[in-house]
Amino acid sequence: MRTVTLDRGPTPAAAIGIQRIRSSHIAIAVTGVAFLALFWQPISTLVRDWLHDPEAGHGLLLAPLAGWLAWKRGIAPTARAQPLLGLAILIGAVLLRYVSGLAAELFTLRVSLMMAAAGLIVFRYGVRQLVHWWLPASLLVLSIPLPSVVVGTLALPLQFKASQIGAALLEARHVPVNLQGNVLQIPGQTLFVTEACSGLRSLSALISLGVLVGGLWLRYPVARSVLLLLTLPVAVLLNGIRVFLTGFLVFFVDPALGRGFMHVTEGWIIFVVAFLILGFIAWGLLHIEQLYARLRARTA
């Protein structure tokens, strides 16, 4: 005789588990579609600015890097879902999205996008997960271009400061220079320090790099804060040196060196130097942290 075993399907407990998995996948898919439908405009305009706006180009690096860092860090062991708080953040993000859409204000539109993403994380994993992902979250926030009003407000003082440093260095090299605001007049030439030459672009990129380097290398918030605070004088000083180099080459070598390829090349060289200085500062702060840790271990 042969014994025939009938396949009765999964047990009730297994069936419930499968149903929950399916429901979870459906919920994730519906949430993703709803998120894209609501926030497609800020997503598309943000990517457009990353691709076409030189002031926002660093977002092309920061966004994928933030995603990789979030994946690398994974889910925090202490993560616990907080649906009510997450739902409140999501409602606030949707309201901000609606009001920003009516006003056609891109910056707040993009803030609502980040706010909604934070709300989803809190809803599913809680605030502790958001804290666990502070570095990728910070990089995403820094990838949002500043409003034009803020850019104009910040750029003008930076233009003046770079002009003053450049003029002082030119005078130190015995180059006759007359400074009027952000205009340097040297014999036969007039140099105008434009908004693009204010150093704001390099400052935005350096702040992002400072957050990244501090988050990856440094342990203590104080050291990270010091690194960030030092990015401003480094960017301003080096941009003043760029103005000086432009004026020096124009006066002593060839006026054509003040524009075109050579001028752009100077900007890239100055940025690389600024990044190396930032790395050196981070290296010094790391050694200070290690020394502090050893002192604490000895006194413990």
Image: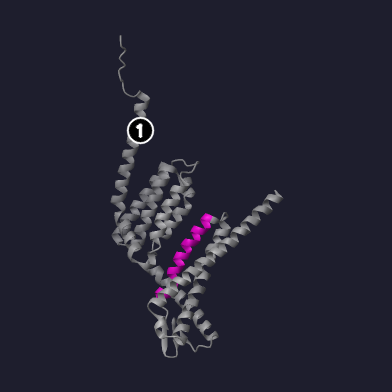
| Magenta run includes residue 209 | yes
Image: 157 above or below 20: below
Q: Position of residue 167 (x, y in %)?
A: 50, 83
Left or right: 148 in relation to 241: left
In this figure, which colouring scheme has been used for the structure?
one colour
Residue 163 in view, yes or no:
no
Total numbered circles: 1
The amino acid type found where label 1 is placed reads Arg
Determine which residue is flagged by label 1: 20
Task: Name which quarter of the figure residue 139 lies in.
Answer: bottom left
Q: Position of residue 130 (x, y in %)?
A: 46, 48
- Residue range in magenta is 194-216
Residue located farthest toward the bottom when viewing the structure as drawn: 187
Q: Position of residue 237 (x, y in %)?
A: 52, 74
Left or right: 201 in relation to 33: right
Identify which residue is drawn at 50% across, 73% down. Answer: 238
Image: 89 above or below 22: below
Left or right: 268 in relation to 40: right
Residue located farthest toward the front when viewing the structure as drawn: 1
> The residue tagged with tag 1: helix, strand or loop?
helix
Name the foreground residue: 275 vs 194: 275
Name the foreground residue: 20 vs 63: 63
Q: Position of residue 132 (x, y in %)?
A: 49, 48
**Looking at the rendering, in which quadrant would you find the N terminus?**
top left
Residue 141 in view, yes or no:
yes
Image: 218 above or below 82: below
Identify which residue is drawn at 45% across, 68% down. Answer: 202
- Give the prevailing secondary structure in the magenta stretch: helix
Identify which residue is drawn at 42% across, 74% down. Answer: 265
Badge 1: residue crowd in 10 Å (few <14, some 14–19, many ≥20): few
